[in-house]
Amino acid sequence: MYHLKPKFPRVEYPLVNNPISFDGLGIAPQMIGVIDRLKFKIPTPIQQKAIPPAIEGKDLVGIAQTGTGKTLAFAIPMVQRFSQRKGKGVVLVPTRELAVQVAETFQKIGSTFGIRNAVVIGGASMNEQIRSLRKNPSVIIATPGRLLDHMSQRTVMLADVHVLVLDEADRMLDMGFLPQIGQILKALPRDRQTMLFCATMPQAVAAIAASYMKLPINVEIAPSGTLVERLTQELFIVKKENKNDLLAKLLTQYRGSILIFRRTKIGARKTTRSIRAMGYPAAEIHSDRSLSQRREALEGFKAGRYRVLVATDIAARGIDVTGIEVVINYDLPEDAENYVHRIGRTSRAGHQGHAISFATPDQRNDVQSIERLIRTALPISEHPEIPLERFAAPTRYVFAPRRSHGRFRRRL
């Protein structure tokens, strides 16, 4: 159990006024050349504020909404460091998909400097990962469980790790990885740089920062519940049995790439089959799919082979696809904060985006939880061909006497 220590200091690195490039952030000229070739023109706010202290080797807590470029905020400083002097870095992520995407970013900016990375994730061949680790990569991108597997088999050693990144730390804790993260942190050298990035700052994340980081700089771009820019939202109140009919109407109305979220893998499977029966190419991502199947689905969605991707919350922060026209919450999430992460898959990189949610008449409280978090009301829409529904009246209780048991609650 981690105990929350006094708040760590908040040191602000001001945003560059009217930034036109990555100049002025402490980035080496050769790295600037790589960034220019990759056509990264203007740094995002989290990149502007996180890169300078990260390059200086300071511990860092970066809080920013999804889709704001957090990966480059730690990848650029790490590649620059390891290109100048020997060292090893570990990036912990919650999902396999995110690990692959982080590895792709490191490959893009690190190949010029000979910086190799290894991806260590569940569902992939241990033997292949061992061969990759034997090549002594500078950066290991891993999910916590699989990294512990390698540590127990002594196929990876962490004694020479100089930089640790906890990416999407809040999501890792949501998924129950706190014990594994604790074991990994205890195995790492104390003399290291630690960077923690997340979209929200629950107490457990703050406790990790207080217990395992050295006076971390707090870089916060947007508070919890802040939505991405250029995003519109709407809510349909619909009976459960009418959801599929409404989905069919929306798939006809919107012609771009569509990401649909279901709460369960069984639901995701059923919806995927239903969409295919409507004549649309669709794929699914959830925990019952193998790593190769999930990769094929995501790559096919990126390439346009699949117009629709149906996912559970395992993909809420693991899908980095520019140009998703609409995110549809077929089921509302169990946790209101996941609503923000889900709809953050659209409106990325400055693109216009739209989010549609289905709520059943008995989900008034779920909708209100989301509205409290995002600090705005969800606009309610009506489709002319689907029966209009309203939220059920709130349940009220009164106490009434009962002859043998005193008082009891009676539903009105």
Image: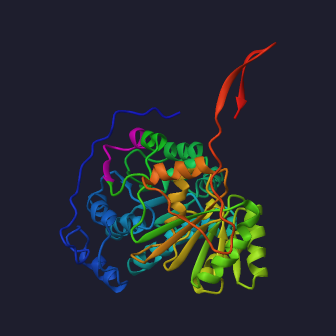
Q: How many marks?
A: 0
Res. 85 visible in picture? no
Residue 63 vertical placement versus 253 (above, below): above
Residue at x 34% of width, y 86% of height: 37
Going by the picture, which residue comes out furthest to the left? 17
Residue farthest to the right, as pictured = 404
Looking at the picture, does residue 85 appear above or below residue 337? below
Residue sitting at 34 percent across and 81 percent down? 34
Q: Quadrant of residue 357?
A: bottom right
Q: Is residue 36 left or right of residue 139?
A: left
Up/down of 32 relative to 216, above or below: below
Residue 320 within the magenta-colored segment of the rendering: no
**Residue 201 appears in the rendering:** yes
Q: Is residue 155 left or right of residue 31?
A: right
Q: Nearer the viewer, residue 13 or 236?
A: 236
Left or right: residue 352 compared with residue 41: right
- If the image is split into quadrants, where does the C terminus sit? top right
Q: Position of residue 157 (x, y in %)?
A: 54, 54
Height in image: 334 above or below 406? below
The image's colouring method is: rainbow
Where residue 108 sits in the image (x, y, percent)?
A: 44, 79
Residue range in magenta is 209-219
The one of 8 and 165 positioned closer to us in this rendering: 8
Across and down, in percent, residue 162 comes to 40, 55
At 36% from the left and 65% from the top, the residue drawn is 73
Q: Considering depth in this image, is 111 or 154 the residue closer to the camera?
A: 111
Residue 72, horizontal then vertical, whole percent: 39, 69
